[in-house]
Image (tube, coloured by chain):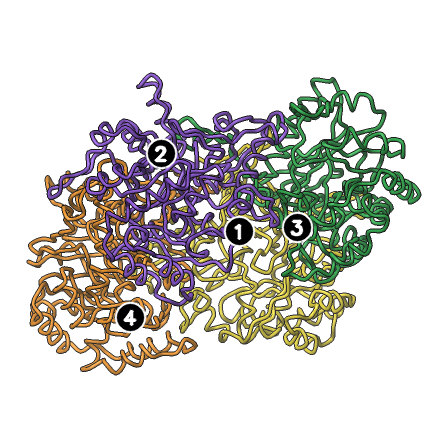
Chain colours: A purple, B orange, C green, D yellow
Amino acid sequence: MRDVVEIGLGKTAQRGYHLDDVAIVPSRRTRDVDDVSTAWQLDAYPFGIPCVGHPSDATMSPASAVRLGQLGGLGVLNVEGLWTRYEDPTKILEELAALPEEAPATRRLQEVYAEPIRPELITERVRQLREGGGTVAVRVSPQHTLALAPVILDAGVDILVIQGTIVSAEHVSTTDEPLNLKEFIADLDLPVIAGGCTDYKTALHLMRTGAAGVIVGLGGDEWSTTESVLGIRVPMATAIADAAAARRDYLDETGGRYVHLIADGDLRTSGDIAKALGCGADAVMLGEPLSLCEEAPAGGAWWHPAASHPKLPRGAFGTADQPLGSMEKLLYGPADEPDGQLNLFGGLRRAMAKCGYRDLKEFQKVGLVLDR
Amino acid sequence: MRDVVEIGLGKTAQRGYHLDDVAIVPSRRTRDVDDVSTAWQLDAYPFGIPCVGHPSDATMSPASAVRLGQLGGLGVLNVEGLWTRYEDPTKILEELAALPEEAPATRRLQEVYAEPIRPELITERVRQLREGGGTVAVRVSPQHTLALAPVILDAGVDILVIQGTIVSAEHVSTTDEPLNLKEFIADLDLPVIAGGCTDYKTALHLMRTGAAGVIVGLGGDEWSTTESVLGIRVPMATAIADAAAARRDYLDETGGRYVHLIADGDLRTSGDIAKALGCGADAVMLGEPLSLCEEAPAGGAWWHPAASHPKLPRGAFGTADQPLGSMEKLLYGPADEPDGQLNLFGGLRRAMAKCGYRDLKEFQKVGLVLDR
Amino acid sequence: MRDVVEIGLGKTAQRGYHLDDVAIVPSRRTRDVDDVSTAWQLDAYPFGIPCVGHPSDATMSPASAVRLGQLGGLGVLNVEGLWTRYEDPTKILEELAALPEEAPATRRLQEVYAEPIRPELITERVRQLREGGGTVAVRVSPQHTLALAPVILDAGVDILVIQGTIVSAEHVSTTDEPLNLKEFIADLDLPVIAGGCTDYKTALHLMRTGAAGVIVGLGGDEWSTTESVLGIRVPMATAIADAAAARRDYLDETGGRYVHLIADGDLRTSGDIAKALGCGADAVMLGEPLSLCEEAPAGGAWWHPAASHPKLPRGAFGTADQPLGSMEKLLYGPADEPDGQLNLFGGLRRAMAKCGYRDLKEFQKVGLVLDR
Amino acid sequence: MRDVVEIGLGKTAQRGYHLDDVAIVPSRRTRDVDDVSTAWQLDAYPFGIPCVGHPSDATMSPASAVRLGQLGGLGVLNVEGLWTRYEDPTKILEELAALPEEAPATRRLQEVYAEPIRPELITERVRQLREGGGTVAVRVSPQHTLALAPVILDAGVDILVIQGTIVSAEHVSTTDEPLNLKEFIADLDLPVIAGGCTDYKTALHLMRTGAAGVIVGLGGDEWSTTESVLGIRVPMATAIADAAAARRDYLDETGGRYVHLIADGDLRTSGDIAKALGCGADAVMLGEPLSLCEEAPAGGAWWHPAASHPKLPRGAFGTADQPLGSMEKLLYGPADEPDGQLNLFGGLRRAMAKCGYRDLKEFQKVGLVLDR
């Protein structure tokens, strides 16, 4: 049974589990790896792999977002990132890529992100994405959704991602007109992905706003400092499983609306991806792992969008020596290192085969062991 | 349910949890950060932030205590520290600040604290504090309270902090006249903060002495050696929650006396502060984090008052390369490093906003997850 | 009671334990070490020690397999390894032994294993094993069993080991004719060892195929990357105990067929071996520990057979400075280092003596403590 | 409740706890440190501190054993150590003290301990101990007790310590006449301390042999390799508490025979000592901590007696840069380092004072918290 622990007299805490705490248990038949499908579909958009690009400038440029689409995933560009603040941010990205270890990187991020967003660049970037072919998706923060949505929608995107550290269905403000997600989504005729969230209740409320997909997690990784700054830490295995329960309950409540769960956090290897899907996710959002491919815009550097916050940055700036290989090699191999960072979806496919499952939806039922 | 574990046949132990074991779970609405208040009030004294300076000479001088008051917190000077043993301890503080890593620092601390306390310097230091404006508070050990109280009270303080490793409501001695806290406090007409304590029972008994505030914890941090020396280790999340239960029971027992809990231990980042308050504390006592600001008296060095004990020192001597910034920057930002050591109360405020709470008392109900 | 933990709403995981999590508890009489027997018998083949060589080219060559047999264990040669791909692989083994730390070792492994298997070399290697005297055993993967079995059986082996990452009793394929283990074994008149498996159900199903021995575990060790790549991690104490339950149930179901459990994973020291047997294993399969003896074919280098997979390698390449001693010294001592890597079965024997047990079957009942 | 965990189907393990897992909780009155007594008495022999010297040659020579007695503890000389193999072992001890880190230390230990024991030296060493004044105690292994006891008893000791890795009340042998502890002790008219043991049952059986004291634990410390070699690891908090339950049951069974528990393992600091006594021990056996005093025979080197075993050594050879201070300073302070290695029994006394206890027997009831 799940523990509710009394940490002190009258004060309880839910026990939560990380992806590292669990592992997959093969316990039935095995299956040929070639008979396994990793296909994923969100609304009208089919994908070869359940892979969403994390909308950090370290991972997603117009070019790399298009490339991810060509390879079967969903690229997402951040319309509050460098590409909508600068006509041509490549110089800045090169500078960041070359930042020495001891540099005050956070300060430099704060500086380059202090430049205002230029709406006409949003239009331009969406045009570039559309020209690339494939599904067009951009990310906007909940704070700027009302202001930027008209430009974005005019530019013509396929999927809108509304993503902040925590996105709730009910934001309270005494000063600004807050975003009412439910009304906002009801007025749109394109699918919205919203999040992050970390628990059953928030996930369910986000589903009730009409979102097609809900992001579970806060993009936690080894560079994350959300816990040090805010005291918030997300045990992803539990967060995903709880959100999957919300998906099930919402499916029942609506008589059939299936909302997709996109896991965002603690995903570094193909093994992590397999565990996240085994816990109930429909897809994964990959940030730092994709920052290590040759097509990554910042040459192996990685930072979370929140790392450039002007007053309370969250997330350290990481650098890598050199790319691990092309995006194709990262996603599909062949791997020539055994550490799980290459052939990410070939690894997933083989894990599914060893457990005897044919598709992603079936694989959500895989057995788990808890050993930490 | 809270575990009582049988560690061996017939020998039980209560299970306890550290702040690191728990994390905050946002699970309701979100709120504008500008609508959140971090105000705290102890007796008649209002504060902008729930922050008490740890009465170590590494953190609190007359000047830095005054500065903390100006910035909205409560400065506390140790009347058994260097400032009441030396006319001018700045030379000594400079020497300690410059102590090389390999120096036998504990021995040097023992030497400089061997100098006797001079009562006239207590009077002088209190005068300096009072001149600085703001609330005047000093710390005295329970052993020396009876001897030093007359001088302190004559000098005119607003709040008296009686703090030792463990302060119990009943100290037994066959040789000296022990301090009877209850009688002592009853005779005073100023609020007393007393502690540390680590469990429900001691906290409740301290409340019954008439204290306005109770210190929970022993000031544990990474330099602490209380466990190695005494076998005592305090799981702060549990200690705070248990003391909060004592506060609740005492409130009921007295028909309305609310005693404030000041958490003292394992607090290094804004995230830790948020967790301590989420566990039920009313305020936090900050030692080592404040030793890292430019105004700190010992230039980044840190030692706990018990580290200079002549026979059984507890607590190592720590040094820092250079200050992280002004006290204002530490408390209110803006942060230019993402590690949770800057903008301590801006971080708290944002954590409250992400969980949808307006004030500190409400925030004590925040949801927690336990994942270690 | 064993925990089934709800990691999230409606999603459960079995709690599992590693060998490191448990330890042996002496709790009865003690016994002279000379009165203890480590004899093991599989089908008609008696062994002085319950030791099976891991069929990696780093451990088992025709010569070292023969030597292990002479010393009382069971050598197993991989018929899909270098010895059946090359007339004389010694140059390659020397090259691998001398590979510098920074070399792209996985890539080199992939290259040398890209050479096709030559059936006539299988015949030749089995002949060499048979000439060495002792029990002849070879390993084949389930994928190649149907193709290679005729050659192997013609060559004349005593025991056939069918080993893959996960071997299930029911492999599903839409393209190839899958191996039906039950039918395959029924047609043989020699004992088969099959595995790995990691849970009760798969172990029981493997027993029902008619296997004489079942391999429990996936050969996990500190160089293993199965978790990073596939998300699979095996808590060996639980895996062994669960398989022992399957052995017990299968014994009952068949009215007396006793299937041997061979533990393969997390075995580095004599203490680990004692724990694995104490959890219920009948024998252990030793890989990396045997790669450290003077007779090891690759001079102290170690790699798991899966580490050379062309597309999804699993397992890092390890190297050692110099051999720890002869195979005899590793197995029987005397040890001149106290770290448990020498005198592996003398250590087992002494552990059995300190707990008062006379033979391996009795020792499976030894008491365990769980303390992590 | 204490857990019995099913680690796999039908295989259980008792959950055990280490001293590191628990900590002392002050939760009542406090007391003046000068009102606290650390007196201990075993049979007719009174001691100022509950401290037994570990009979390793690294800790106990005739001179250091006498010195420990003068300082209030119980020195114990190993009659199977260097002092009974060599007329004058000081040269060897000096050599060992100067052994470089990279030396094959275990091999050298095996060599110097290969020298046979000379009975006349036993007589001589006991004479030296007796001349030193204080209580005379020597250690013999259970294997050699029958052979060496006549010499030892003739020489005239006060207390006999029969200590091996595991001492059971019933040793089984088909070749030698095994030691029957019960008969052996019944024939003696001096108190015997016997052990180690690690569980309730063995402790109870040892008590029934008539032993005055039982050693709990195997002398585990950071140099210990018992787990790697034998798979045995002792969670000391549980082992002590279980043995204390045996002491209680034996007291009842005999209508009043109180057998003392001497904890031997995981004791490095004053905090560890306080925890061991708080778990129910009557005294502690100190090995490595005493090897760090100026009077230690091997200049800071440390090895467990089992580390010189000719075939299966257990325990690494440790060295220290320089002594921490005199034995008196280690036992009674004053400490000038805060790490708990100095003023070992002053630290214990202060821990007792902070918890309000007057004597050791009372302190066994102290509250514990479990937090790992």
- The disc labelled 3 sits on which kind of residue? Ile
Circle number at residue D261 = 1
**Which residue corresponds to mark 2?**
A4
Q: Nearer the viewer, residue D30 or B251?
A: B251
Task: Name the front one of labels 1 and 3.
Answer: 1
| Chain to which mark 4 belongs | B
- The disc labelled 2 sits on which kind of residue? Val
Is residue D365 among what the camera can see?
A: no
**Which residue corresponds to mark 4?**
B323
**SS label for mark 1:** strand
Answer above or below: position of D285 versus A181.
Answer: below
Please report the residue visible at 65 percent of the width from the left and 23 percent of the height from the top: C174
Q: Nearer the viewer, residue B104 or C141?
A: C141
**Rounded to the nearest whole Å, what is the CA distance between mark 1 and mark 4?**
52 Å
**SS label for mark 4:** loop
**Which residue corresponds to mark 3?**
D185
Q: Position of residue C192 (x, y in %)?
A: 78, 30
- The disc labelled 4 sits on which kind of residue? Pro
- The disc labelled 1 sits on which kind of residue? Leu
